[in-house]
Image: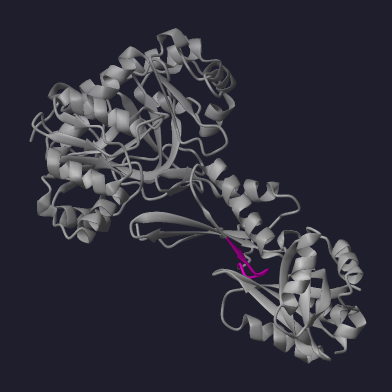
Amino acid sequence: MKVEQISIFIENKSGRLAEVTRVLGEAGVNIRALSLADTSDFGILRLIVDKTDAANEVLKSKGFTVNKTEVVAVEVPDRPLGLNSILQVLDDSRINVEYMYAFVERCGENAVIIFRFDDTEGAIRVLTEQGVKVLAGQRVYSM
Amino acid sequence: MRIWDPDRECMARDKLEALQFENLRTTLERAYRNVPCYQKKFLEAGVSAKNLQHLSDLSLFPFTTKEDLRLNYPYGMFAVPLREVVRIHSSSGTTGKPTVVGYTRNDLNNWTELVARMMTAAGVTADDIVHIAFGYGLFTGAFGLHYGAERIGASVIPISSGNTEKQIMIMQDYQSSALVCTPSYALTIADHLDRMGLGADSLKLRVGLFGAEPWSEEMRREIETRLGILATDNFGLSEVMGPGVAGECEYKCGMHIFEDHFIPEIIDPETCEVLPPGSMGELVLTTLTKEAFPMIRYRTRDITRLHYDTCRCGRTLVRMEKTCGRSDDMLIVKGVNVFPTQIEEVLFQVEGCEPHYQLVLDRDGHMDTLEVQVEVNETIFFDEMKKQREFVSMVEKRLAATLGLRARVKLVEPSSIPRHEGKAKRVIDRRKS
């Protein structure tokens, strides 16, 4: 039920983001979802791609610092309080969200949101118990 | 042109040398007798005070280095029992342990006299109101100047450092006429005056005595113009005494070294040979009168040149040029001594981290800034921003604890710091002086 994500350290200077996307593109890797957290000095680019291992290797070979992390893709009802209902479930179980970002595509009537939790296993269990749909990795990579 | 102690400061060289010889022999004997470190060094070098037949025989004796002081921390280099020590100061302590120095009552008296000489040479008189904006504490700067100014009979304002606007208010209200601080702080004061819409004429400052960090002639001109004062340079180091080892007279043509208390030598830092007069090299100092903490041939690591011709002021004492660098890789940042190796040690103590790093020194206004650029790698890269920031602030805290100075840590991409063959170029100094 977990989704593999790669994170890349990027210095805050022009052209670096373009370099990452160029390297990935030339390796035939397609980006499925992304988020960029930034400070004035550096950024952390988080990506979900269709070929995680290939992306990881090619970026490392180009000298980028890359980490693999496990995140959770959750279907969120596309209506007011949709996201809130899920966050409430997590809060009731005292599971902390480290960060989250939205997926580019929708899954039927639902939006897809990527979560990074402090307790990934616990989060998946709680969400599933409460009837929230958690998407499998393979499903996400090929959306 | 006033001279505080003309008998000593304008001595004929042959008389001076006779005095130096006598005191040097006594110092060597006392050091050998009372300090195990000197005893060991002299025995290893096969010399004793008896080998001193001429002043030039000083070159037979071994050098003393910062490392010796570190190994004998805290009191191992003291030549008197602690009972006779009436004051303890220390260096900034940036190479692990600080250097502890002690003074007997006589030492304090001599120190005060020498600072009085230096301040008189700069033009300070009993009519002056001396504003001391050095931090009061273990650092020798503030107390050294304080007692010297009192000895002259000037009125001393021991304001210490910080809170520039209040300093300006006090300078205005109390009519401070002589300013004692670091040269960069003098410019910070000038900046604040500008910001407050005040001119130099809103103050009564007349003269400034600046030390504790290297500064250029351009910086002197800027200070003089913006504060409307005569800006003089002085030199000292806690290991040898503190401020008052050397100071400029109003002619500003090099700092007179008070040779009746210290013997300067210039050596080649590579071969350690004594160089002929007028050569550029590393300054080595030997104390002649210090009781609690005698220093025999202390390698200051400061690069300078000595001028023996008599100054227009009438003082016969040798003059040293502004130091123009170091024979080791020490940096002076905000008046604090920093060795790149200390930063390296801190970084390498971070678990799993053997990063490439580079130090960038710059000026923000007139204050020095130190940025430590660290190449990120997989062990110190965290996907969560919170953890990444925690990492940066943890390294910053450790650096502050080791260096005694705030340094900013900046993470950079791998391989973005240039690699050099052989000795790495770790330091980029963008400061002008």
Q: Quadrant of residue A20?
A: bottom right
**Res A27 visible:** no
Give percent across and percent down for residue B157.
Answer: 21, 33
Residue nearer the viewer, B61 or B424: B424
Q: Quadrant of residue B306?
A: top left
Residue B238 relative to residue A125: left or right: left
Asked if residue B416 is among those painted magenta in the image, a careful observer would answer yes
How would you classify the magenta stretch by its main secondary structure? loop
Q: How many marks?
A: 0
Q: Quadrant of residue B160?
A: top left
Q: Is residue B255 above or below residue B407?
A: above
Residue nearer the viewer, A40 or A60: A40
Residue A33 relative to residue B411: left or right: right
Give percent across and percent down for residue B278.
Answer: 31, 44
- What segment carries the magenta color? B410-417
Q: Is residue B215 above or below residue B144?
A: below
Q: Residue at x 78, y 58 (%)?
A: A94
Q: Quadrant of the N terminus of chain A?
A: bottom right
Q: Is residue A50 above or below residue A130?
A: below
Q: Residue at x 74, y 65 (%)?
A: A97
Residue nearer the viewer, B90 or B263: B90
Give percent across and percent down for residue B136.
Answer: 35, 32
Residue nearer the viewer, B77 or B225: B225
Q: Quadrant of the C terminus of chain A?
A: bottom right
Residue B426 relative to residue A105: left or right: left
Q: Residue at x 49, y 11 (%)?
A: B34
Give percent across and percent down for residue B165.
Answer: 25, 49
Q: Is residue B13 above or below residue B22?
A: below
Colour setting: one colour
**Res B376 visible:** yes
Asked if residue B93 is among those painted magenta in the image, a careful observer would answer no
